[in-house]
Image (cartoon, rainbow, N blue to C red):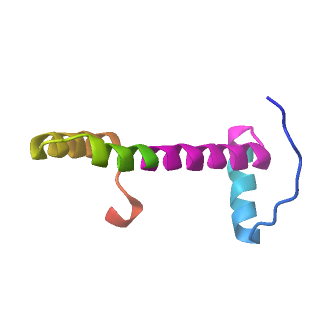
Amino acid sequence: MTTRKFTVSLDGELYAWAKRRAEEEGSSVSARVSDALRAARRAEALDEYVAWSDAHVEVSPDETQAAADDLEEALPPSPSAA
């Protein structure tokens, strides 16, 4: 994989958080930014797939509920739910 250096401007508080997290993980801010961009790319691909499947795949209400239940079990509670 080829890497490219460039300059990014971040809010000071966001940078401090990213640096702290990177140090805790034995990583770097650059690695954290790369991870975030990869996650954003995966989320975009998932959104595109969902849009495509909405147009091409029929899912029953029971299947939708089962998937929602599985997702709820797999994900940690949201901070707003605490």
Residue 23 placement, left or right of 51:
right
Residue 46 painted magenta: yes
**Residue in the image at 88% along x and 53% along y:** 6
Residue 1 placement, left or right of 74:
right
Q: What is the x, y in percent for residue 44? A: 52, 50
From this view, report whether residue 27 is shown above or below residue 54: above
Q: Quadrant of the N terminus?
A: top right
Q: Residue furthest top?
A: 1
Q: Quadrant of the C terminus?
A: bottom left
Q: What is the x, y in percent for residue 75? A: 35, 45
- How many marks are shown on the rendered structure? 0
Span highlighted in magenta in the image: 24-47
Q: What is the x, y in percent for residue 42? A: 53, 43
* Magenta segment main secondary structure: helix
The picture quadrant where one finds residue 27 is: top right
From this view, report whether residue 46 is shown above or below residue 18: above
From this view, report whether residue 81 is shown above or below residue 36: below
**Residue in the image at 10% along x and 42% along y:** 62
Residue 72 painted magenta: no
**Residue in the image at 74% along x and 37% along y:** 26
From this view, report whether residue 51 is shown above or below residue 13: above
Q: Nearer the viewer, residue 39 or 11?
A: 39
The picture quadrant where one finds residue 19 is: bottom right
Q: Nearer the viewer, residue 35 or 1?
A: 1
